[in-house]
Amino acid sequence: MEKFLFRIAKKWIAGDTMAEALKSAIQANKNGMGAIINRLGEHSTSKAQVDKTVLEYLTLVSKLSKYKVSGGISVKPTQVGLARGFGECLNNFGIIAEEASQYNSFVWIDMESSEYTDDTIKVYLSLFEKYERLALAIQANLKRTESDLETLLDKGAKIRLVKGAYRENKSTAYKTRHEVDENYKKLTQMLFIKGNEFGIATHDAKLIDLAINLSEIHQKKFEFQMLKGIRDELKPVLIKSGFSVSEYIPYGTNWLPYSIRRLKERKRNILLLGSSFLHSHRV
């Protein structure tokens, strides 16, 4: 089963190494897209592992500059200490954001399961006024997100809107695809009305069309964000239509938990991945 999943995962994961991720990022730039690189891994409780991850992101930021890659990095809070304590995580994000600012690289703070939502938002709000190129992911499947987004937009936050991939209970999250999609639509409208700079991270054609329609009414700085290897046929169409597109590029050996979440997130992802795979292998 794991071998089968790996064959699928290779479509959306750059490889095991930073060098492979940089190669994918350079190719994304050549294709007219920005690159958002994430080192796979989460829930680190060892200080040695946390320190190693921080160092890797610092190295990655310098490599993005060296190879003139347009884009940035995306970091999970529990990769850099949140599972160990808020203060350690805040300090490490400060180190990463400071280094990234020296190279004019963007830093996205990923959102994880709801037990970390409050602290993740606090980390972002503690740093975003100092670092212009710092942004936060929020999840449409969480019932609290509408209220969170109101607060964040009032403060001028930069946002990535995702559907959400973590298992949550009914009191915390919407459980049906329809409910999540409806909330995603509501949050998208909020971003176009009150947002300043944001990412619409979805592969869903109806949600992409909604964003396109809203962009004709509200002139905002935004981009579409999609996983490497998914909707590859749509990305150049959006670019030719004048929209900015960035590709989310994960790498690393810890690919299994991430890939399982991607497949469980929505059954639609399996269909999209299969379609992208067939499209890329046509002769």
Image (spheres, grey):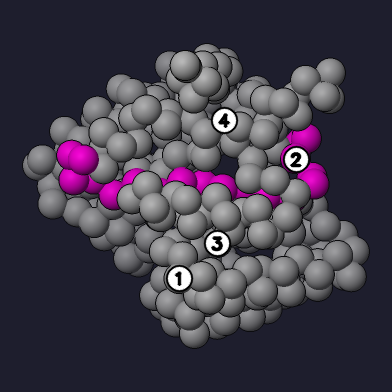
Q: Around disc 3, counting alpha carbons within 10 Å, would you say few (fewer than 14), some (14 to 19), or many (20 or more)?
A: many
- Of the two numbered discs 4 and 3 on the same chain, state the one appearing first in sequence: 3
Mark 4 falls on what kind of element? loop
Q: Quadrant of residue 71?
A: bottom left
- The residue identified by callout 3 is 73
The amino acid on which the numbered mark 3 sits, given as a three-letter code, is Ile
Q: Marks 2/1: CA distance?
A: 27 Å
Q: Nearer the viewer, mark 4 or mark 2?
A: 2
Q: Nearer the viewer, mark 2 or mark 1?
A: 1
- Of the two numbered discs 4 and 2 on the same chain, state the one appearing first in sequence: 4
Quadrant position of the N terminus in the picture: top right
- The residue identified by callout 1 is 68
- The residue identified by callout 2 is 255
**Eyeballing the image, is 123 above or below 42?**
below
- Of the two numbered discs 1 and 3 on the same chain, state the one appearing first in sequence: 1
The amino acid on which the numbered mark 4 sits, given as a three-letter code, is Ala
Q: Around disc 4, counting alpha carbons within 10 Å, would you say few (fewer than 14), some (14 to 19), or many (20 or more)?
A: many
Q: Which mark is residue 242?
A: none
**Eyeballing the image, is 38 above or below 179?**
below
